[in-house]
Amino acid sequence: HADVLDVGSGPGHQAFELAQVVGSQGHVEGVDSAEGSLETGTRRCSGLDNVSFTPGDAYKLPFETGTFDVAMSSQVFEYLDDAPKALGEMFRVLNPSGRVLLHGTCWGALLWHSNDPDRMARILKIWDGHLADPRMCETMAKKLGDTGFDGVSAEPIVHVETSYDPSSMSAILTKFVSGYVVSQG
């Protein structure tokens, strides 16, 4: 039995997957500030009795102290202006033996081959502007410890693509990066 909180649940991908893991005795609660994401997550998880979604934000989670066994968040903390405040809220809603799992992208470690390396460097520098903290992965362990979490560890997961595939993460990311860079002039 595990009650899991997904902070910044977005369209419900992780909530859907976690529902299978916690089974009928557990529950997954997604929280997000975007109404459209909550609607998409609710549709994605329709028919799953152990998943629900609640409007709210990471800085003031709408749950009682000690409610959850696990709190997780994927691709959220690098976009938050006040990560320590959001971590404090996750710490608050976890039970005393609870665990937290954060997943993010270390954009500073991104290597992207280009025939024009100077242009690529400029593009990636502009891309950093879409984040509240482009170096979040490098400082998260200290922030977790400062919040009160103990036993903090980090595990890098390397993603490598060596050829072009239109359905790959890099091809999809290219659309977001180019759109953002163009929007910045």
Image (cartoon, rainbow, N blue to C red):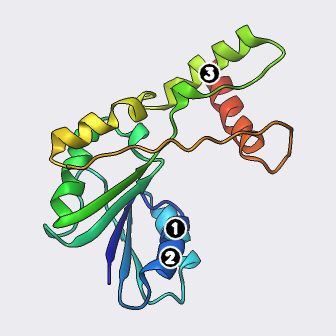
Q: Nearer the viewer, mark 3 or mark 2?
A: 3
What is the quadrant of the C terminus in the image?
A: top right
Would residue 82 be seen by someone viewing this image from the given angle? no
Q: What residue does disc 3 label?
A: 124
| Above or below: residue 18 compared with residue 94 | below
Numbered disc 2: secondary structure: helix
Q: Earlier in the sequence, mark 2 or mark 1?
A: 1
Q: What residue is at 15 percent from the left and 70 percent from the top?
A: 64
- Horizontal side of 161 relative to 107 (left or right) equals right
Q: From mark 2 to mark 1, how far is it between C-alphas?
A: 7 Å
Numbered disc 3: secondary structure: helix
Q: Which mark is residue 12?
A: 1
Would residue 109 be seen by someone viewing this image from the given angle? yes
Residue type, mark 2 in image: Thr
Q: What residue is at 28 percent from the left and 46 percent from the top?
A: 152
Residue type, mark 3 in image: Leu
Q: What residue does disc 2 label?
A: 42
